[in-house]
Amino acid sequence: MQKPTSADDELCEAASAVLVRAHDSRQHRVAVAARGTSGAIYTGLSLSTARVNVCAEPTAIANARMAGEDAVDTIVAVGLDPADVPIVINPCGVCRELVPNFGDSIRVIVSDGGEVGVVSPADLLPIPWVRARSYD
């Protein structure tokens, strides 16, 4: 696991600011910040209802794509700890499959037992799911 850079810290702060501003324990529990290859930061927020849950990672990636980014360079998700302080959390299984599709060498900021660092998608999902054949 690589050490975070000051740019990574800035990304964590951007996601934390969104979560503090928009947190609602029923609707918005996770915020994400993604840095596009241009250097711009895009944020996203989880969306939850009694029937549907959408992770924050796809909303941040969608915001980056809508702004014209070709790819995402770095991404981080944050949630609130029991004292309502934002902390880095790890992507769920679905997002571990989704995120690598939007950047060839994307960096993922994670927490390993409270130690924050940067890993590659291959570190998160070493044996990814693939189709047995294409149906296109």
Image: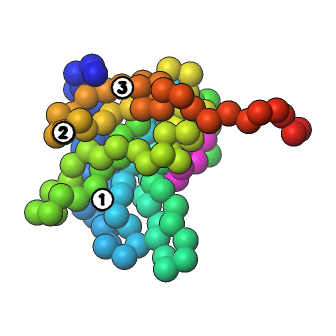
Say whether residue 60 is magenta: yes
Instruction: Identify which residue, 16 or 26, lies in the foreground.
Output: 26
Instruction: Identify which residue, 125 or 87, lies in the foreground.
Output: 125
Mark 1 residue type: Leu
**Res 36 seen here:** no
Which label lies toward us, 3 or 1?
Answer: 3
Q: Residue at x 33, y 34 (%)?
A: 109
- Placement of 57 over or under 97, stated as above or below: below
Q: Residue 43, image x and y in percent?
A: 42, 49
Instruction: Identify which residue, 119 or 113, lies in the foreground.
Output: 113
Say whether residue 71 is magenta: no
Q: Which element is circle 2 on?
A: loop
Q: Residue 124, image x and y in percent?
A: 42, 32
**Res 118 seen here:** yes
Which residue matches tag 1? Answer: 19
Q: Residue at x 50, y 20 (%)?
A: 105
